[in-house]
Image: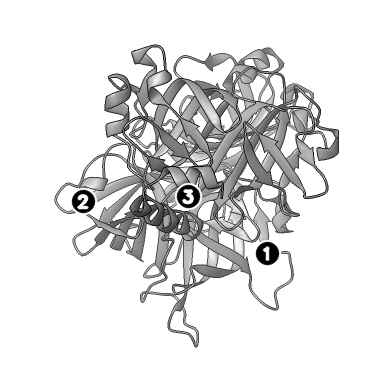
Amino acid sequence: MKNKIISRAPYSKLINFILMVSLTICGVGCSGGTGSTGSTSNDNKNIQVATGTIIGFGSVIVNGIRYTRKSGLADDRVKLRFENNTSAGEANLRVGMIVNVTGTIDAATETGEYESIEFQPEIRGPLDASGVDTTKGTFTIMGRTIQVDSNTNFENIRDLTEIKEEMLNHPELEISGNLDNNTGIIHATRVARKADDFNTLPVRTVQLKGKISTANATSGSFTIDGVTVNFSATSLGLNTVSADIADGVIVEVKGTVNDAGTVVTASRVEKKNAVDAAVNGFVCVKGTATGGIDNKTITINGPNGAITVNAAGAVYQIGDASATSAISTAGATLEVEGKLQPDGSITATRVYIDTDKSVKLEGNALAGAFNAIINNLTLNGVQVAIAATTRLVGNKGTPLDLSQIKEGDHLQIVGLFDITTGKVKASQVQVTAASTVTFIQGPVTNITNSNMTLIGMITVDPAAVAINHKFFDNRTGIHSVVDGPSAFIAAVSDGHTVVRATGTVSGTVLSATELELEQAQ
C-alpha cells in the first residue's frame, strides 16, 4: 500500500478502505446450501452446481469462490466439450469462460473443491463479412449477433476494432456469454480468436446455441436465427428425444457448416435446460437481470437463456451489506442461490451483487516494464504480480515471453487486486496489435469531493476531463451520459463502484479524457 494514498484519507476512510479491499479479495461468493444433492461431514460443505464466469486463477475463481481440485482426483476433471476433451487440465481454462462447476463449498472460508468443471462455448464459427458495428459494439457469427462491452475479455485478438480489421479473413471466433431469449443476442464475457481464416480449416466445425424456430420433424430440420440445421435421429444427444425438437426450445448444435455459413449439418443436437443441474439440487448461478422484481419473481439471462427466480423468500445483498429487491434492474449482473425446481426455475435463498474483484488494464509498455527479479510487470502505473498460473498470450496467440516485452508493446492485463501486496495479481497478460488506447478499470477504493482513487494506487480527477459529455454510466448495459464531474462523483460509492478511466498516466495520477461507471462482474 502506498503511504501517500493512505495519508490523504481521514481515519474513518482508511478503515472503510481496508474493509472494502478485504471484501474485494474474498467477496461474498456462493455460500453453499441446505438443498444439496449430497452431503459431507462438514455442515458448511454441500455439493452444488455453480454456473458463472471465470475471473481468476491460483485455483479457479468462479462466483466469488476459489475452487481447488478435490483431494485424490487426477488433474483431468476439466471438460472442454467443443474439442471433445473430457480430461483436460486447469491450464486450458481462460478468464471470461462461463463454466459449470460441480463440487463442494465451504461457506466459512469461501473456498470450494471441484469434482468437475465443464466449458462449452455459446457459439464458435466464422466471423461474417460486413458483420461488425463498432458504434453499437456488435459483430455477427453465422448471423447471430454478439454484443461486447467493457467487461468482455479478449484473447488472441485486441478488441472489436481489430475484429473489424480482420473481417474479410473470416477468422474463427469462440464466444462465451449470456443468451437473451427475446432478441437472440449473446452478451459476450469472452471473445477468442481460434484460427486466422475459418475457410482454410480442414474440417469446418461450428457450434451454436439458441431457440428453435420452424421445426420440421419430417424433413429433419429447424432454424436458429436464420441458420438452417439439418439433423438425424442419431445426432440427438444426451437426454434429447425427437419430441424436444420443437419451436421455442433452446438447443445446442455442433456440426459442419456450408460455405455460405447458413446451413449446419449436425453431428450433435442437445436440448438445454435453463440451468444445467439436477432437480432439487442447490445451485449458484450468475446472470444478467432483464428488469426489476415482478410479483416476487426475477428473470435473469444465463448462458442457456432466461432463468425464472422465485425470490419470495430470498435475502438481498451487495457485498456483505443488506440490500433490497431494488438491486434487480435491467442489465444488472446478479448472482442467485437456491434450489432448482422441476420446471427449471430457482427458488432463491439469496440474490446478490458481488463486490467487484476484477481489474482491467490496457496501454503501451514503458521501457523495463517487466522486472524478472521480483516477477513484476508495471502498466499505467499499476504494479502487477505474475504467478505460475497467469495465462500469458502473445500477439495472435503466439507464446509470450515476459522478458521480451519492450517499450511500446501494447498490453492488456486482467487480474485481481490484492491488499496484502498492494499489487494486482495477474490472471491473464496479453500482447496485442498496436493501439493508442490507455485505461484502468477497477473498484473505487477512496473518494473525496474532487477526486477518487482506483485500486488503492491511482488517483483520478474527474474535474480534469475537458468535456462534460465524456462522463458515462454503463451499469445497466445502456451507455448513458452523466451530466458532468459533480454528478459523476455523486454516483460513486467506496467499495461498490467500478470505474473505467481512459486517459494518460504520470506516476500515480491518471489525467482522464473519459470516465465511465461500470457493472460489477
Tell me whether the residue at label 3 lies in contact with that at label 2, contact meaning CB atoms closer than 8 angstroms. no
Cα gap from disc 3 to disc 2, whole angstroms: 32 Å
The answer to which of marks 3 and 2 sits earlier in the sequence is 3
Q: Earlier in the sequence, mark 1 or mark 2?
A: 1
Location of mark 2 (residue)? 325
Residue in the foreground of this view, choosing between 107 and 302: 107
Q: Is residue 310 above or below residue 192?
A: below
- Which circle marks residue 77 in the picture? 1
Q: Using residue 439 as the reference point, say whether residue 335 is left or right of it.
A: left
Residue displayed at 41% across by 27% down: 516
Q: Position of residue 111 (x, y in %)?
A: 53, 68
Disc 1, SS: loop
Q: Name the residue beneath numbered marker 3.
A: 271
Q: Nearer the viewer, residue 285 or 183?
A: 285
Q: Residues within 10 Å of mark 2 (few under 14, many from 20)?
A: some
- Please give the name of the residue rendered at 43% of the width and 83% of the height, measured from the top-left corner: 43
Quadrant of the rendered structure where residue 197 is? top right
Q: CA distance from mark 1 to mark 2?
A: 37 Å
Q: Nearer the viewer, mark 3 or mark 2?
A: 2
Callout 3 secondary element: strand
| Residue type highlighted by circle 2 | Ser
State left or right for residue 266 relative to residue 461: right
